[in-house]
Every structure is written in structure tokens, then in C-alpha cells.
Image: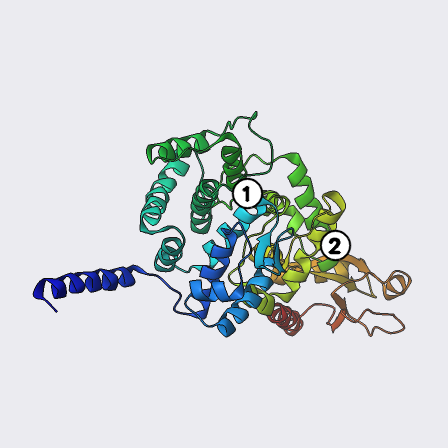
Amino acid sequence: MKQEDRAQVQKVLDAIIEESKRVIFPETPDERFLFGISWLFFLNEPVSIQKLAEKLYVSKTAMLQTKKQIQDTIRWYHGLFLESGKKGMWISGNERIKRHALAEILNYRTYGSILMERVITFLFGSEKYEDYILLYHQLPQILSEHGYRLIDKAIEGFALDIFISLMRTDKQFVLEEQMDDISCENACVESICAVLCEMGYHVGGRDQLFLEECLSAKRVLYVLGKDYHIPEEYLLITDGFLDRVDRRFHTDYQNNPELLSRLSVHIMKMIKRIQQGYFETNPVLEDILNSYERDVEAADELNKILEEKYHIKANIHELCYIAIYLRAYYERRLKAVVLCDIGESIADNMMRRINDYCGDRIEILNKMSLAEYRLNPLPVDLLISTARVYNVNLSKKTKVIYVDYLMNEENLKDIQEYLLQDMQKE
């Protein structure tokens, strides 16, 4: 081979090697899932398992495992389906929900900027990733200028909402709703669209309204002492929910104005997410289920209201966020009745001593005689008595503590010990 021919061959080989270095392919099962589901969302025709395996540089067997993972993920989003036919598989469903779902999946499964870069570059190339990063870096300032204070994951999620909408519109995937005659009046979205215009992107009317919808459902970072404008509809829902929880679990959430305000904001945005067809992934789901079983059970009371009023239901991811609110504001006070057989003044002194030592943890509902309690056995956590309690149908949860008439230190320690045990059970 002539010298000049060898040089030409070497040049071609070098170009191939350089190109191969830029090729991105999944290196782990998690990456295979992300690359696979993202690519499927952007296909407009069915694809075979074999072709998808070749696209991801994996075996057909490995791809079948990934398909099962994709199916399990798609099932979380009502209205989306992983369809299969003679020509292959595809994701069907409403375009709006597809955009929400893909943004949510990428937001909570990329675990950092490096993986996000790999996924976006795999799908659209490195130049589009540079556009995404430029948008992402400008977004916090724009949001701040318009009074939005979002948690980090909400900012990342909104950046993905915007970017995925741009990419899907570019690929001719359009929102089904006829919104062209409706203009967006959100100043923040208008500012974002102005920045995108400078980057060479045009955002149509229906896409602007979609972004406004996305922004309305993002979780906020609360400001201490700030009064949030909350429509009465959501205040009533939250108040009714807390009332249900208080009556069932003997708590006192309903009288906490800060909890009512913050939880109303959260529930309002959660309802919007569910109505829009998606949900907020909870990255500590298993930890909450394992550690806060009672709070999760209490949070499920909200679904009774949502089903009755909106015919919707919050899934376990969303319920666990509610459970965290309940846990954070939990101040359970045990309900108690004082039984005294020799006079009201003795009972009053007992109540005063109990309140002085344990008032923050015990709510004394009444002072009663044993005869009176037999006729009307109030469902309480504690029955504090100076005499033997008998011939009474007590519930399993009611604990009887016997004390002296003058409530000595030993009696108070017994009550405090029980309170400590109750706190540990929570």
C-alpha cells in the first residue's frame, strides 16, 4: 500500500475511533431503563425488541428484562399504556400525560447531572444538552423575579417540562387540546418564553398554557410567616381531612393554623398533579412506609374526600408526602378521664397535678364517678382512678392507672412512664 493510501486509511480509522468515543450507550441496568423508556416516548411508530436492543447495544434477553421494568413504570400513569403488536411495541396515550410522565421519570431517576447529560445527549445530541443546561441555569433567577420559591426538585422538574415540550413539539408531537385561541397570562412563563426565543425556540400558545399548568403544580419552599393565597375550596378540603384524622387518631391537627396553611398549599398542588395525569415520585417511599405506618394510614383518609369530591385518588407516593406533614406536626395528646370516689375537690387537685406535670401530653376530658362511667364509658386512652375499676366494658386501647388521692410523685412517674412508652410506639 502506498504511503498516501496508508495515510488516508489512517485518517478514516481515526475518524471512526473519534466518532465511537462520542457514541453513548447504557452501561448499567438503570441506564438501560432510562435510555429505553425515553427513546420509546419519542417514537411515532412501533419498534421491535430486537431493534431496541440494537439501539441500546444490549442483548435481546437483557432488553426483555428492561421491557418488563418499562411496563411496570408506565402502569403508574393512568391513561398511558405500553402496547404490543405484530410490528413491535409503543407507548400510547394522551400527549399531555406523556410529557408529564417523561419529565417526572427523568427528574427522579437521573440522580445527578452526569446521567442527565448522558440521557439527553443519547436522545438529541450534545448541542441540545447545552441548550438544556443554559435554560436550567437561568430558570432559578426567572422564577425568583416572579415570586416563585420552589424546592430544587421542582426547579429541575420544571426545566424538564420545558425542555421535553420543546423537543416533542420539534418532533411533531402536539398537544391535543384546541388552545390556540387562548393566550397565556402568566408573566413568569412569558419571561421564560422570551429567553427561549433568544435561544431560537418558538413556544406556541397551547404549549405556553401547558407550561403554566406545570408551574401551578410544583412544590414550593415555604417562607416562615408568609400568608399564602389559598382558594377556600382547598382550605375546606384540608380542614375536613384534618378533622377526620383528629377524630380517628385522637390528634389535634385541626387547631394548628400553620399546618392547615402549608398542607392546603401542598394538597392544592397535588390535586392539580393528579388531574393533569401524573404524580410526584417519593424517593424515600420505603423508609416512610416502614417507619411511619400510622401516619400513612392517617394520610389515606384524604382519599375518601378526593374520591367523593373529584373522583380521583392519590397514590402511595403522594400519600407518603402527606404522611410526612402529619409526622412533622404531630403532637398527640392522650385522652383521659379521672375517676374519684370521695369528692370533687380531690378530683380537681388530681387534675391540676396531672396538668402541671403532663399537660402537654394528656387532655383530661372529664372527672367522673365509677358509677357514672359505667353508664357512659367514654373511649379514652387513660383511665386514672383512685379505686379499683370493675364491671366496666373497657376498650382494648384504654389503660387503667391507679393512683393515690393526693397524687404522689410515684403516681406521676407512672403516668409519665406510660406516656414515654406511648411515644416510642409511634
41 or 217, nearer to the observer: 41
Residue 398's disc is none
Q: Could you tell me which quadrant the N terminus lies in?
A: bottom left
Which residue shows up at 76% across the image and 72% down it?
400
Residue 191, x across and y down, in percent = 40, 31
Residue 24 visible in the displayed image: yes
Q: Which kind of residue does numbered mark 2 sit on?
A: Arg
Q: Could you tell me which quadrant the C terminus lies in?
A: bottom right
* Residue that numbered label 2 is attached to: 247
Q: Which kind of residue does numbered mark 1 sit on?
A: Ala
Which residue shows up at 58% across the image and 54% down it?
91
Verify CB contact (< 8 Å) between mark 1 and mark 2: no
Label 1, label 2: how far apart the Cα atoms are: 30 Å
| Quarter where residue 328 is shown | bottom right
Residue 107, x across and y down, in percent = 46, 54
Residue 381, x across and y down, in percent = 74, 65
262 or 159, nearer to the observer: 159
Q: How crowded is mark 2: few (under 14 residues within 10 Å), some or many (20 or more)?
A: few
In the displayed structure, 51 sits above or below 304; it is below
Q: What element carries label 2?
A: helix
Which residue shows up at 66% across the image and 48% down it?
254
Residue 274, x across and y down, in percent = 62, 47
* Residue that numbered label 1 is attached to: 217
Farthest residue, direction front: 1
How is the model colour-coded?
rainbow
Q: How crowded is mark 1: few (under 14 residues within 10 Å), some or many (20 or more)?
A: many
Mark with earlier residue (1, 2): 1
| Quarter where residue 81 is shown | bottom right
Farthest residue, direction left: 3
Q: What element carries label 1?
A: loop
In the image: residue 314, left or right of residue 153: right
